[in-house]
Amino acid sequence: MIKREQFIEAKHKAVQMIRECGIVLNQNEMDEMDVADFGLNHLYVEGGQMLGFFNTNRVSAKVIAMFPRQTLPEHWHTAFDDNIGKEETIRVAKGTLYLCIEGEDTLNHAVIPDNKTHCYTARKEYVMRAGDQITLEPGIKHWFQGGDEGAVVYSFSSAAKCALDPFTDQEIVRITQIED
Ligand code: ZN
């Protein structure tokens, strides 16, 4: 649950961050922007601001603004219908992003939110800066965190059905609920 004022404030901040990258946004995209607290009620600790450009049956593109040290919780992209699951390329437009995926534990810069060790099992860390990109195969657990100045990243992928993606943290509610 996220309060309306907090939702609007976060959206404005995220739009500003994205525009500072020189990315042009239209009104509809801004209106539809998702400020996700994942039902955890601490947006600036665990959350993300996702702005979609398009999401057809085959391809999807969006931009994600991460506030300083904000963490997008660990999840993976599962198969749906006759699709093997989303393949996603994360490319940093601005700032630093700590991306963690399954593999050898090299966690060094990203900080797991308090009391959430069990919800962040993927510990192979990549430090990504503007121009860096990584492609994630379907089914690979991943999570990421904005650096001290936050980050703006592109997500280019095959068709996305984010509402179906499982999260390691069982407390998560993916669909954002806004409280007036
Ligand atoms: Zn993902």
Image (spheres, rainbow, N blue to C red):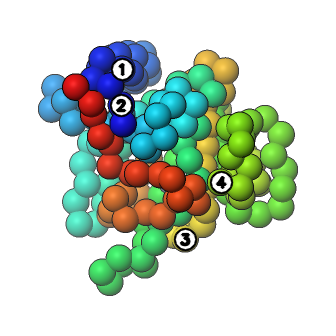
Residue placed farthest to the bottom in the image?
82
Taking 26 as reference, is 87 above or below it?
A: below
Mark 3 sits on what residue? 139
Residue drawn at (43%, 37%) of the image: 37
Residue drawn at (36%, 57%) of the image: 162
Q: CA distance from mark 2 to mark 3?
A: 29 Å
Q: Tag 4 or tag 2, which sits nearer the N-term? A: 2
Q: CA distance from mark 1 to mark 4?
A: 25 Å
- For badge 1, the amino acid type reads Gln
For the residue labelled by badge 2, is the local secondary structure a helix, a strand or a loop? strand
Residue 2 tag number: 2
Residue 10 locus on image (x, y percent): 38, 21
Q: Tag 4 or tag 3, which sits nearer the N-term? A: 4
- For badge 3, the amino acid type reads Gly
Residue 35 tag number: none
Mark 4 sits on what residue? 119
Q: CA distance from mark 1 to mark 3?
A: 32 Å
Graded by Cα atoms within 10 Å as few (under 14), some (14 to 19) or many (20 or more), the crowding at tag 1 reads: some
Q: Is residue 87 left or right of residue 80?
A: right
- For badge 4, the amino acid type reads Cys
Q: Tag 3 or tag 1, which sits nearer the N-term? A: 1
Residue 114 locus on image (x, y percent): 71, 37
For the residue labelled by badge 1, is the local secondary structure a helix, a strand or a loop? helix
- For badge 2, the amino acid type reads Ile
* Mark 2 touches mark 4? (CB < 8 Å): no
For the residue labelled by badge 3, is the local secondary structure a helix, a strand or a loop? loop
